[in-house]
Image (cartoon, coloured by chain):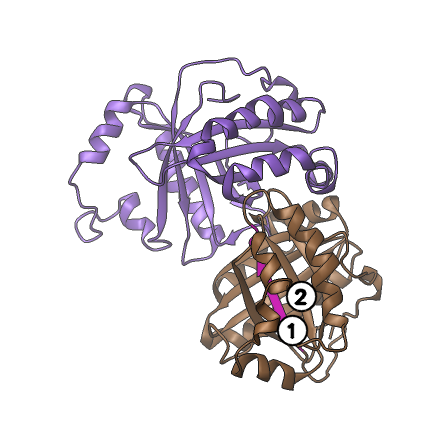
Chain colours: A brown, B purple
Amino acid sequence: MLFIHEFHKVVGTRAEAFEAAYRERWMPVLAEGSDARLAWYFDLAHGSGLAYRVVTVTAVRDGAAYARLAERVARGDLQSWARDLDGLRHETHSRVLVPLRWSPGFPELSEIPAGAASREPALYMEDTMWPFPGKLRAYVEAAGAVYRPSLQAEDARMHMHVALGLETMPGAGRSPEVTLLQRLSSLPRLITLLTEDIPAEVTGPGSWMHEALDLRDRWRSRLLRTAPWSPLP
Amino acid sequence: MHETHRVIGRHASEFEALVRDEWMVALAGGGEARLLWYLNHAMGSGPAYEVVTITAVADGTAWEALGRRMVEGDLAGLATRLDSCRHEVEGKLLVPVYWSALQDVDLATVPVDGRTHPLSVYMQDTGWPHAPLDDYIELWDHDYWQIMRQTPPEKKLLDIQACFQVAHGSGIRPEAILMQKIMNVDTLGRLLTSAEKHDPTTWPGTYMAKGLEVRDQWESKLLRTSAWSPLW
Protein backbone atom coordinates (compact mmCIF):
# COMPACT_ATOMS: atom_id res chain seq x y z
CA MET A 1 0.00 0.00 0.00
CA LEU A 2 1.12 3.56 -0.72
CA PHE A 3 -0.28 6.76 0.76
CA ILE A 4 -0.69 10.16 -0.89
CA HIS A 5 -0.35 12.76 1.84
CA GLU A 6 -1.50 16.24 0.84
CA PHE A 7 -1.21 19.47 2.77
CA HIS A 8 -3.57 22.05 1.28
CA LYS A 9 -3.47 25.81 1.72
CA VAL A 10 -7.14 26.49 1.21
CA VAL A 11 -8.67 29.80 0.10
CA GLY A 12 -10.51 30.86 3.24
CA THR A 13 -13.64 32.00 1.44
CA ARG A 14 -13.81 28.71 -0.48
CA ALA A 15 -13.18 26.36 2.44
CA GLU A 16 -16.61 24.73 2.29
CA ALA A 17 -16.43 24.24 -1.46
CA PHE A 18 -12.97 22.72 -1.06
CA GLU A 19 -14.24 20.23 1.51
CA ALA A 20 -17.22 19.40 -0.69
CA ALA A 21 -14.88 18.70 -3.62
CA TYR A 22 -13.27 15.91 -1.59
CA ARG A 23 -16.46 14.65 0.04
CA GLU A 24 -18.71 14.70 -3.00
CA ARG A 25 -16.28 14.03 -5.84
CA TRP A 26 -12.86 12.65 -4.88
CA MET A 27 -14.14 10.16 -2.28
CA PRO A 28 -17.01 8.68 -4.32
CA VAL A 29 -15.12 8.65 -7.61
CA LEU A 30 -12.27 6.68 -6.06
CA ALA A 31 -14.78 4.31 -4.49
CA GLU A 32 -16.03 3.35 -7.95
CA GLY A 33 -12.75 1.58 -8.64
CA SER A 34 -10.33 -0.61 -6.74
CA ASP A 35 -7.12 1.44 -7.09
CA ALA A 36 -7.48 3.96 -4.27
CA ARG A 37 -9.59 5.28 -1.41
CA LEU A 38 -9.68 8.54 0.49
CA ALA A 39 -8.71 7.48 4.01
CA TRP A 40 -8.72 10.67 6.09
CA TYR A 41 -9.83 14.26 5.72
CA PHE A 42 -8.35 16.46 8.46
CA ASP A 43 -8.57 20.12 9.36
CA LEU A 44 -5.56 21.56 11.08
CA ALA A 45 -7.05 22.56 14.43
CA HIS A 46 -7.54 26.32 14.56
CA GLY A 47 -5.45 27.79 17.33
CA SER A 48 -2.62 25.32 16.85
CA GLY A 49 -1.03 26.59 13.67
CA LEU A 50 -1.75 28.03 10.26
CA ALA A 51 -5.36 28.79 9.35
CA TYR A 52 -7.31 27.10 6.56
CA ARG A 53 -4.98 24.16 6.23
CA VAL A 54 -6.32 20.74 5.35
CA VAL A 55 -4.55 17.39 5.29
CA THR A 56 -5.88 14.55 3.17
CA VAL A 57 -4.53 11.02 3.08
CA THR A 58 -5.43 8.80 0.14
CA ALA A 59 -4.51 5.12 0.20
CA VAL A 60 -3.38 3.65 -3.11
CA ARG A 61 -3.04 -0.03 -3.85
CA ASP A 62 0.44 0.02 -5.44
CA GLY A 63 2.71 1.83 -7.88
CA ALA A 64 0.71 0.84 -10.94
CA ALA A 65 -2.50 2.10 -9.32
CA TYR A 66 -0.73 5.31 -8.39
CA ALA A 67 0.40 5.87 -11.97
CA ARG A 68 -3.13 5.31 -13.24
CA LEU A 69 -4.51 7.78 -10.72
CA ALA A 70 -1.87 10.39 -11.61
CA GLU A 71 -2.71 10.00 -15.29
CA ARG A 72 -6.44 10.47 -14.59
CA VAL A 73 -5.66 13.71 -12.72
CA ALA A 74 -3.22 15.01 -15.34
CA ARG A 75 -5.30 14.35 -18.42
CA GLY A 76 -8.15 11.99 -17.70
CA ASP A 77 -11.56 12.03 -16.10
CA LEU A 78 -10.26 13.70 -12.92
CA GLN A 79 -8.56 16.59 -14.75
CA SER A 80 -11.62 18.83 -14.42
CA TRP A 81 -11.86 18.04 -10.71
CA ALA A 82 -8.22 19.07 -10.25
CA ARG A 83 -8.79 22.21 -12.30
CA ASP A 84 -11.74 23.18 -10.10
CA LEU A 85 -9.66 22.52 -7.03
CA ASP A 86 -7.00 24.93 -8.31
CA GLY A 87 -9.51 27.70 -7.73
CA LEU A 88 -10.25 26.63 -4.18
CA ARG A 89 -6.74 26.46 -2.76
CA HIS A 90 -3.60 28.50 -2.96
CA GLU A 91 -1.41 25.43 -3.30
CA THR A 92 -0.90 21.89 -2.13
CA HIS A 93 2.30 20.21 -0.96
CA SER A 94 2.07 16.49 -1.33
CA ARG A 95 4.19 13.38 -1.11
CA VAL A 96 3.83 9.67 -1.58
CA LEU A 97 4.58 7.64 1.52
CA VAL A 98 5.19 4.00 2.29
CA PRO A 99 4.46 2.32 5.65
CA LEU A 100 7.34 1.69 8.03
CA ARG A 101 8.19 -1.94 8.61
CA TRP A 102 6.57 -1.84 12.04
CA SER A 103 3.58 0.32 11.16
CA PRO A 104 0.25 -1.10 12.36
CA GLY A 105 -1.88 -2.89 9.80
CA PHE A 106 -4.15 -0.90 7.55
CA PRO A 107 -7.62 -1.93 6.29
CA GLU A 108 -8.09 -3.35 2.84
CA LEU A 109 -9.20 -0.64 0.43
CA SER A 110 -12.57 -2.32 0.04
CA GLU A 111 -13.11 -2.00 3.80
CA ILE A 112 -12.73 1.78 3.84
CA PRO A 113 -16.18 3.40 3.84
CA ALA A 114 -16.96 5.84 1.08
CA GLY A 115 -20.34 7.01 2.25
CA ALA A 116 -20.73 10.31 4.04
CA ALA A 117 -20.42 9.15 7.62
CA SER A 118 -21.13 11.53 10.47
CA ARG A 119 -19.41 11.09 13.78
CA GLU A 120 -17.63 13.01 16.48
CA PRO A 121 -14.32 14.42 15.27
CA ALA A 122 -11.18 12.65 16.43
CA LEU A 123 -7.91 14.39 17.18
CA TYR A 124 -4.60 13.23 15.76
CA MET A 125 -1.08 14.37 16.44
CA GLU A 126 0.87 14.14 13.22
CA ASP A 127 4.60 14.16 13.96
CA THR A 128 7.09 14.57 11.13
CA MET A 129 10.75 13.99 11.89
CA TRP A 130 13.88 14.70 9.90
CA PRO A 131 16.68 12.34 10.98
CA PHE A 132 20.30 13.38 10.60
CA PRO A 133 22.12 12.48 7.38
CA GLY A 134 22.55 8.72 7.15
CA LYS A 135 20.43 8.07 10.27
CA LEU A 136 17.06 7.34 8.68
CA ARG A 137 17.16 3.57 9.10
CA ALA A 138 18.49 3.78 12.65
CA TYR A 139 15.76 6.24 13.55
CA VAL A 140 13.00 4.10 12.08
CA GLU A 141 14.22 1.07 14.00
CA ALA A 142 14.54 2.97 17.27
CA ALA A 143 11.11 4.55 16.91
CA GLY A 144 9.60 1.12 16.40
CA ALA A 145 11.51 -0.54 19.21
CA VAL A 146 11.36 2.20 21.83
CA TYR A 147 8.95 5.02 21.03
CA ARG A 148 5.92 3.13 19.79
CA PRO A 149 5.80 0.70 22.73
CA SER A 150 6.26 3.60 25.14
CA LEU A 151 2.89 5.01 24.08
CA GLN A 152 1.24 1.84 25.35
CA ALA A 153 2.91 1.95 28.76
CA GLU A 154 0.68 2.51 31.78
CA ASP A 155 2.58 5.66 32.74
CA ALA A 156 2.65 7.07 29.21
CA ARG A 157 2.47 10.84 29.22
CA MET A 158 0.32 10.86 26.12
CA HIS A 159 -2.65 8.64 25.57
CA MET A 160 -2.42 8.00 21.87
CA HIS A 161 -1.36 5.28 19.49
CA VAL A 162 0.37 5.18 16.15
CA ALA A 163 -2.28 4.64 13.51
CA LEU A 164 0.19 4.77 10.67
CA GLY A 165 3.98 5.11 10.50
CA LEU A 166 5.30 6.34 7.17
CA GLU A 167 8.43 7.34 5.31
CA THR A 168 8.87 9.03 1.97
CA MET A 169 8.75 6.84 -1.08
CA PRO A 170 12.03 7.62 -2.91
CA GLY A 171 11.55 10.33 -5.48
CA ALA A 172 8.17 11.48 -4.22
CA GLY A 173 8.90 13.87 -1.38
CA ARG A 174 11.53 14.95 1.07
CA SER A 175 14.00 12.52 2.59
CA PRO A 176 15.08 11.65 5.20
CA GLU A 177 11.64 12.17 6.65
CA VAL A 178 9.35 10.07 8.82
CA THR A 179 5.71 10.82 9.63
CA LEU A 180 3.71 9.27 12.45
CA LEU A 181 -0.04 9.66 12.39
CA GLN A 182 -1.08 9.23 16.02
CA ARG A 183 -4.67 9.11 17.26
CA LEU A 184 -5.31 10.71 20.64
CA SER A 185 -7.58 9.11 23.16
CA SER A 186 -7.20 11.61 25.99
CA LEU A 187 -7.55 15.34 25.67
CA PRO A 188 -6.44 16.15 29.24
CA ARG A 189 -3.04 14.58 28.60
CA LEU A 190 -2.63 16.77 25.55
CA ILE A 191 -3.54 19.88 27.53
CA THR A 192 -0.97 18.90 30.15
CA LEU A 193 1.64 18.51 27.46
CA LEU A 194 0.80 21.95 26.09
CA THR A 195 0.63 23.80 29.39
CA GLU A 196 3.27 22.26 31.62
CA ASP A 197 7.02 21.85 31.44
CA ILE A 198 8.23 18.43 30.46
CA PRO A 199 9.59 16.71 33.62
CA ALA A 200 13.32 16.14 33.80
CA GLU A 201 12.92 12.38 33.96
CA VAL A 202 11.29 12.47 30.55
CA THR A 203 14.16 14.35 28.96
CA GLY A 204 17.13 13.03 30.96
CA PRO A 205 19.79 10.47 29.98
CA GLY A 206 18.32 7.09 29.19
CA SER A 207 14.98 8.52 28.08
CA TRP A 208 13.69 8.36 24.50
CA MET A 209 13.70 12.16 24.37
CA HIS A 210 17.38 12.19 25.26
CA GLU A 211 18.74 9.20 23.40
CA ALA A 212 16.89 9.92 20.17
CA LEU A 213 18.78 13.20 19.94
CA ASP A 214 21.62 11.15 18.46
CA LEU A 215 19.34 10.44 15.51
CA ARG A 216 17.35 13.66 15.07
CA ASP A 217 16.64 16.93 16.79
CA ARG A 218 14.06 18.42 14.43
CA TRP A 219 10.46 17.50 14.17
CA ARG A 220 7.10 19.17 13.77
CA SER A 221 3.79 18.30 15.37
CA ARG A 222 0.44 19.13 13.82
CA LEU A 223 -2.85 18.75 15.61
CA LEU A 224 -5.35 17.46 13.10
CA ARG A 225 -9.07 17.03 13.59
CA THR A 226 -11.01 14.62 11.41
CA ALA A 227 -14.00 15.92 9.52
CA PRO A 228 -17.25 14.30 10.70
CA TRP A 229 -17.48 12.49 7.35
CA SER A 230 -13.82 11.43 7.14
CA PRO A 231 -13.85 7.81 5.91
CA LEU A 232 -11.58 6.68 8.74
CA PRO A 233 -12.30 8.11 12.19
CA MET B 1 11.87 11.24 -10.90
CA HIS B 2 13.27 14.72 -10.23
CA GLU B 3 15.48 15.06 -7.16
CA THR B 4 17.14 18.12 -5.70
CA HIS B 5 19.97 17.12 -3.39
CA ARG B 6 21.35 19.47 -0.76
CA VAL B 7 24.80 17.93 -0.60
CA ILE B 8 27.18 18.21 2.34
CA GLY B 9 30.03 20.28 0.91
CA ARG B 10 32.79 18.06 2.26
CA HIS B 11 31.15 15.02 0.70
CA ALA B 12 30.39 16.51 -2.70
CA SER B 13 32.92 14.39 -4.61
CA GLU B 14 31.89 11.25 -2.75
CA PHE B 15 28.23 11.95 -3.51
CA GLU B 16 28.91 12.40 -7.22
CA ALA B 17 30.99 9.21 -7.32
CA LEU B 18 28.22 7.24 -5.62
CA VAL B 19 25.67 8.42 -8.15
CA ARG B 20 27.98 7.79 -11.11
CA ASP B 21 29.61 4.53 -10.05
CA GLU B 22 26.85 2.87 -8.08
CA TRP B 23 23.41 4.44 -8.60
CA MET B 24 23.69 4.77 -12.38
CA VAL B 25 25.22 1.30 -12.63
CA ALA B 26 22.59 -0.27 -10.39
CA LEU B 27 19.83 1.10 -12.58
CA ALA B 28 21.62 -0.13 -15.68
CA GLY B 29 21.34 -3.67 -14.36
CA GLY B 30 17.64 -3.67 -15.17
CA GLY B 31 15.53 -2.37 -17.99
CA GLU B 32 13.10 -0.20 -16.08
CA ALA B 33 14.95 2.94 -15.03
CA ARG B 34 17.89 5.08 -16.14
CA LEU B 35 19.65 8.12 -14.78
CA LEU B 36 19.22 10.82 -17.43
CA TRP B 37 20.77 14.01 -16.08
CA TYR B 38 23.23 14.82 -13.32
CA LEU B 39 23.29 18.60 -12.93
CA ASN B 40 25.21 20.88 -10.60
CA HIS B 41 23.53 24.13 -9.68
CA ALA B 42 26.02 26.63 -11.12
CA MET B 43 27.82 28.25 -8.22
CA GLY B 44 27.35 31.99 -8.30
CA SER B 45 23.75 31.70 -9.41
CA GLY B 46 22.07 30.19 -6.37
CA PRO B 47 22.64 27.72 -3.57
CA ALA B 48 26.01 26.05 -3.18
CA TYR B 49 26.42 22.29 -3.30
CA GLU B 50 23.04 21.64 -4.78
CA VAL B 51 22.65 18.85 -7.31
CA VAL B 52 19.66 17.97 -9.47
CA THR B 53 19.24 14.47 -10.85
CA ILE B 54 16.50 13.30 -13.18
CA THR B 55 15.87 9.58 -13.45
CA ALA B 56 13.51 8.12 -16.03
CA VAL B 57 11.32 5.28 -14.80
CA ALA B 58 9.30 3.07 -17.12
CA ASP B 59 5.99 3.15 -15.23
CA GLY B 60 4.34 3.07 -11.83
CA THR B 61 5.21 -0.54 -11.16
CA ALA B 62 8.87 0.10 -11.98
CA TRP B 63 8.92 3.15 -9.71
CA GLU B 64 7.44 1.24 -6.80
CA ALA B 65 9.91 -1.61 -7.30
CA LEU B 66 12.82 0.84 -7.37
CA GLY B 67 11.55 2.63 -4.28
CA ARG B 68 11.15 -0.56 -2.31
CA ARG B 69 14.66 -1.67 -3.28
CA MET B 70 15.91 1.59 -1.77
CA VAL B 71 13.78 1.42 1.36
CA GLU B 72 14.15 -2.23 2.28
CA GLY B 73 15.92 -4.07 -0.52
CA ASP B 74 19.30 -4.47 -2.15
CA LEU B 75 19.72 -0.70 -2.65
CA ALA B 76 19.04 0.22 1.00
CA GLY B 77 22.76 0.31 1.81
CA LEU B 78 23.49 2.60 -1.11
CA ALA B 79 20.54 4.80 -0.14
CA THR B 80 21.97 5.17 3.37
CA ARG B 81 25.42 6.09 2.00
CA LEU B 82 23.84 8.68 -0.30
CA ASP B 83 21.89 10.01 2.68
CA SER B 84 25.16 10.35 4.60
CA CYS B 85 26.50 12.69 1.91
CA ARG B 86 23.62 15.13 1.88
CA HIS B 87 21.53 17.19 4.21
CA GLU B 88 18.34 16.20 2.45
CA VAL B 89 16.79 15.42 -0.90
CA GLU B 90 13.52 16.77 -2.26
CA GLY B 91 11.97 14.49 -4.84
CA LYS B 92 8.95 14.74 -7.10
CA LEU B 93 7.54 12.61 -9.85
CA LEU B 94 7.03 14.40 -13.12
CA VAL B 95 4.94 13.60 -16.15
CA PRO B 96 5.37 15.32 -19.52
CA VAL B 97 2.72 17.88 -20.46
CA TYR B 98 0.81 17.24 -23.68
CA TRP B 99 3.08 19.40 -25.87
CA SER B 100 6.44 18.40 -24.38
CA ALA B 101 9.01 17.31 -26.95
CA LEU B 102 10.08 14.64 -24.54
CA GLN B 103 7.20 12.23 -24.04
CA ASP B 104 8.99 8.94 -23.62
CA VAL B 105 12.55 7.72 -23.28
CA ASP B 106 14.01 4.66 -24.94
CA LEU B 107 15.79 3.49 -21.82
CA ALA B 108 17.98 1.07 -23.75
CA THR B 109 19.66 3.97 -25.58
CA VAL B 110 20.66 5.95 -22.49
CA PRO B 111 24.43 5.71 -21.82
CA VAL B 112 25.34 4.04 -18.55
CA ASP B 113 29.13 3.86 -18.85
CA GLY B 114 30.05 7.31 -17.55
CA ARG B 115 31.49 8.43 -20.89
CA THR B 116 32.57 12.05 -20.77
CA HIS B 117 31.63 14.97 -22.99
CA PRO B 118 31.69 18.78 -22.93
CA LEU B 119 29.61 20.48 -20.30
CA SER B 120 26.30 22.07 -21.11
CA VAL B 121 24.10 24.40 -19.13
CA TYR B 122 20.35 24.22 -18.64
CA MET B 123 17.92 26.84 -17.47
CA GLN B 124 15.34 24.99 -15.40
CA ASP B 125 12.29 27.18 -14.93
CA THR B 126 9.76 26.22 -12.29
CA GLY B 127 6.53 28.21 -12.24
CA TRP B 128 3.68 28.42 -9.78
CA PRO B 129 0.59 29.92 -11.42
CA HIS B 130 -2.24 31.60 -9.59
CA ALA B 131 -4.57 30.49 -12.39
CA PRO B 132 -5.50 26.85 -13.02
CA LEU B 133 -2.44 24.80 -13.87
CA ASP B 134 -3.89 23.75 -17.21
CA ASP B 135 -4.12 27.39 -18.30
CA TYR B 136 -0.45 27.93 -17.49
CA ILE B 137 0.59 24.87 -19.46
CA GLU B 138 -1.45 26.11 -22.42
CA LEU B 139 0.12 29.54 -22.22
CA TRP B 140 3.56 27.96 -22.37
CA ASP B 141 2.46 26.03 -25.41
CA HIS B 142 0.89 28.85 -27.44
CA ASP B 143 2.89 31.86 -26.36
CA TYR B 144 6.31 30.46 -25.52
CA TRP B 145 7.02 27.07 -27.08
CA GLN B 146 5.34 27.78 -30.43
CA ILE B 147 7.11 31.11 -30.77
CA MET B 148 10.46 29.72 -29.71
CA ARG B 149 10.19 26.97 -32.30
CA GLN B 150 10.08 29.62 -35.01
CA THR B 151 13.24 31.33 -33.85
CA PRO B 152 16.24 30.69 -36.13
CA PRO B 153 18.85 28.44 -34.50
CA GLU B 154 21.52 31.14 -34.54
CA LYS B 155 19.26 33.44 -32.52
CA LYS B 156 18.07 30.86 -30.06
CA LEU B 157 18.96 31.25 -26.42
CA LEU B 158 17.08 28.18 -25.29
CA ASP B 159 15.98 24.85 -26.63
CA ILE B 160 13.02 23.50 -24.64
CA GLN B 161 13.85 19.84 -24.30
CA ALA B 162 11.06 18.90 -21.94
CA CYS B 163 8.13 20.34 -20.04
CA PHE B 164 6.65 18.60 -17.04
CA GLN B 165 3.90 18.88 -14.51
CA VAL B 166 4.06 17.25 -11.11
CA ALA B 167 2.38 13.85 -10.92
CA HIS B 168 -0.59 14.04 -8.57
CA GLY B 169 0.36 13.69 -4.95
CA SER B 170 4.13 13.84 -5.31
CA GLY B 171 5.01 17.52 -4.94
CA ILE B 172 3.52 20.97 -5.32
CA ARG B 173 0.39 21.81 -7.26
CA PRO B 174 0.12 24.06 -9.14
CA GLU B 175 3.64 23.71 -10.52
CA ALA B 176 5.16 23.13 -13.94
CA ILE B 177 8.76 22.83 -15.06
CA LEU B 178 10.67 23.66 -18.22
CA MET B 179 13.98 21.94 -18.97
CA GLN B 180 15.68 24.31 -21.37
CA LYS B 181 19.15 23.79 -22.77
CA ILE B 182 21.11 27.00 -23.20
CA MET B 183 22.23 27.14 -26.80
CA ASN B 184 24.09 30.42 -26.79
CA VAL B 185 26.12 31.55 -23.82
CA ASP B 186 26.60 35.05 -25.27
CA THR B 187 22.85 35.51 -25.39
CA LEU B 188 22.63 34.30 -21.82
CA GLY B 189 25.14 36.98 -20.90
CA ARG B 190 22.98 39.64 -22.50
CA LEU B 191 19.90 38.32 -20.70
CA LEU B 192 21.67 38.49 -17.35
CA THR B 193 22.91 42.04 -17.89
CA SER B 194 19.86 43.45 -19.66
CA ALA B 195 18.10 46.25 -17.86
CA GLU B 196 14.86 45.82 -19.81
CA LYS B 197 11.78 46.05 -17.68
CA HIS B 198 8.95 43.92 -18.95
CA ASP B 199 6.25 46.14 -17.53
CA PRO B 200 2.89 45.02 -18.90
CA THR B 201 1.88 48.62 -19.52
CA THR B 202 4.83 49.18 -21.82
CA TRP B 203 5.01 45.68 -23.30
CA PRO B 204 1.40 44.92 -24.19
CA GLY B 205 0.87 41.69 -26.00
CA THR B 206 4.22 40.16 -25.13
CA TYR B 207 4.63 36.80 -23.47
CA MET B 208 6.02 38.52 -20.42
CA ALA B 209 2.92 40.69 -20.11
CA LYS B 210 0.41 38.01 -20.99
CA GLY B 211 2.09 35.61 -18.62
CA LEU B 212 1.17 37.84 -15.70
CA GLU B 213 -2.43 36.88 -16.21
CA VAL B 214 -1.66 33.38 -15.01
CA ARG B 215 1.49 33.66 -12.91
CA ASP B 216 4.00 36.05 -11.44
CA GLN B 217 6.06 33.57 -9.45
CA TRP B 218 8.73 31.41 -11.01
CA GLU B 219 12.31 30.44 -10.40
CA SER B 220 15.10 29.92 -12.89
CA LYS B 221 17.98 27.65 -11.97
CA LEU B 222 21.15 27.51 -14.02
CA LEU B 223 22.18 23.87 -13.97
CA ARG B 224 25.42 22.60 -15.48
CA THR B 225 25.74 18.98 -16.48
CA SER B 226 28.57 16.93 -15.09
CA ALA B 227 31.09 15.72 -17.68
CA TRP B 228 29.58 12.22 -17.48
CA SER B 229 25.87 13.04 -17.26
CA PRO B 230 24.12 10.55 -19.56
CA LEU B 231 22.14 13.33 -21.23
CA TRP B 232 23.75 16.74 -21.70
- Tell me which chain the residue with mark 1 is part of: A
Q: Are marks 1 and 2 on the same chain?
A: yes
Q: Report the residue at 43% width, 49% height from top.
A: B136
Residue range of the region highlighted in magenta in the rendering: A123-131
**A217 left or right of B212 in image:** right
Q: What kind of secondary structure does the magenta stretch mostly adopt?
A: strand
Q: Report the residue at 74% width, 41% height from top.
A: B72
Residue type indicated by callout 1: Tyr
Distance (Cα) linking label 1 and label 2 = 7 Å
The kind of secondary structure element at disc 1 is: strand
**Residue A143 image position (x, y, % from top left):** 69, 58
The kind of secondary structure element at disc 2 is: strand
B61 within the magenta span: no
**A107 left or right of B197 in image:** right
Reply above or below: A196 against B123.
Answer: below
Residue bearing mark 1: A124
* Label placed on residue A181: 2
Which one is in front, B151 or B103?
A: B103
Q: Report the residue at 63% width, 43% height from top.
A: A170
**Residue A150 image position (x, y, % from top left):** 72, 68
Which one is in front, A68 or A165?
A: A165
